[in-house]
Image (cartoon, grey):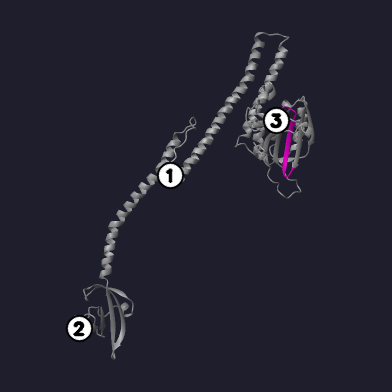
Amino acid sequence: MVEVLDASGKVRASSDYDTGPGSPSGFPNPLPPQVVAGRATTLHDLKIGDGGDFRVLARPTRVGDRPATIVVAVSLAQAEHTLSSLTTGLVIGVPALTALVAWTISLTAGRTLRPVETLRGQAADITATDLHRRLDLPDCQDEIHALGVTLNDMLARLDEASVAQRRFVADAAHELRSPLAALRAQLEVMSRYPDPDRDPQVAAALLEDAERLHDLVEGLLALARSEDPARPRSQAARVVDLDEVVLAEIRRQRSLARAEIDARRVSGGRVRGDAEALRCVVRNLLDNARRHAERHVRVALGESGGTVELTVSDDGSGIPAADRTRVFQRFTRLDEARSREAGGSGLGLAIVGKVVTAHGGVAYADQDPAPDDGGLGGARLVVRLPAVPSPDSSVDPPPAPDGPKPV
């Protein structure tokens, strides 16, 4: 709707054929100031056209020599009808759409999380006595399937650790029972049938069994300490002169060994770790060589390329290639050393492997070269540990190299 109004607000021209010149205008008279100022303004309930609300804009002008005003108005009826329909649709549709989306999310989440609930229920039913059970994996190859695989892998590790623990307890009980039974039997004989001529010999046998029992208990304690992750590592930062430890143990072993111990190849070597644990490693290596050697044991210690290597060789029968890894397991005795007199408790090399691994090194068994090639021809046990750099060295040493069969 367009109208041209004179100064008194009368219509001089109009786009509405029903409104002739000189008739009163349907716009307010006078026009609102904001309309006169040229700002578009919404006016309600106007008596122009079909009536109702209009968006109105005015501009002053002149017709001939007289002032006039051009007023343009656009009906808002269609916009208001559209807005009303949209509001009605939103009021009805939004709650319905929200309910539909909520139901869809609930259904989808339920189907998605149902495998998780199945895994949770099955995991809750697994106890320490049935760690061999495994969780049922969902068919879909997604994150939940990966979670189930991870949980099954964890159960496999727990099952393996539980089996190893039960086997260790059974083996330890069996090993402890034998010397205890011998002690008990000999004490019963001494108490029931006293014999001044025989009792000193029985006492010596009892002392030997007691020493064997003491060594076995000490070995079990050392092995338990080496496997305890909660044990304080405060001593791990200490620098240990491994050559001093080796020479001290060789002096002690020479008073016990029937074989000659050659220490001429022992040179300097400094490592970082627990001095008592490393002393136990050297003692067990020498004990093993002393029991199996015929006449000679050779000890070598040296540092090269950031690694300290300790080698203990003997001239015994050696270790078969198939058993060179197994000797570092608990209670392992080879066929030629089944007797406890010759083979010990089977814990010495297991302690060596655990302690060396805890210190960041490797331990392995090998065959010493034949006498014609400068060796002793028997077993050769090798321990490699990271060396401590000398005070004047500013370069960190490389990690300890792996042996052919690390433990």
The foreground one among 18 and 373 is 373
The quarter of the rendered structure image containing the C terminus is top right
**Label 2 sits on residue:** 20
For the stretch drawn in magenta, the main secondary structure is: strand
The image quarter in which residue 256 lies:
top right
Q: Nearer the viewer, mark 1 or mark 2?
A: 1
- Residue 393 is situated, as x and y percent measured from the top left of the image, at 75, 49
Residue 239 visible (yes or no)? no
Residue 2 to residue 224: above or below: below
Q: Position of residue 320 (x, y in %)?
A: 67, 30
Label 3 near label 1: C-beta < 8 Å? Answer: no
Q: Which residues are magenta?
A: 304-318
- Residue depicted at x 76% and y 39%: 302
Instruction: Name the one closer to the observer, 354 or 406.
Output: 406
Residue pictured at 29% horizontal, 76% vertical: 56
The question of residue 230 being in magenta is answered with: no
The kind of residue on which mark 3 rests is Asn
Indicate the position of residue 303 as horizontal and vertical percent values.
75, 41
Q: Counting residues from the N terminus, which is met first, the one under dot 2 or under dot 3?
A: 2
Reading the image, the residue beneath label 1 is 140
Q: Closer to the observer: label 1 or label 3?
A: 1
- Do tag 1 and tag 2 residues touch (Cβ < 8 Å)? no
Q: Is residue 306 magenta?
A: yes
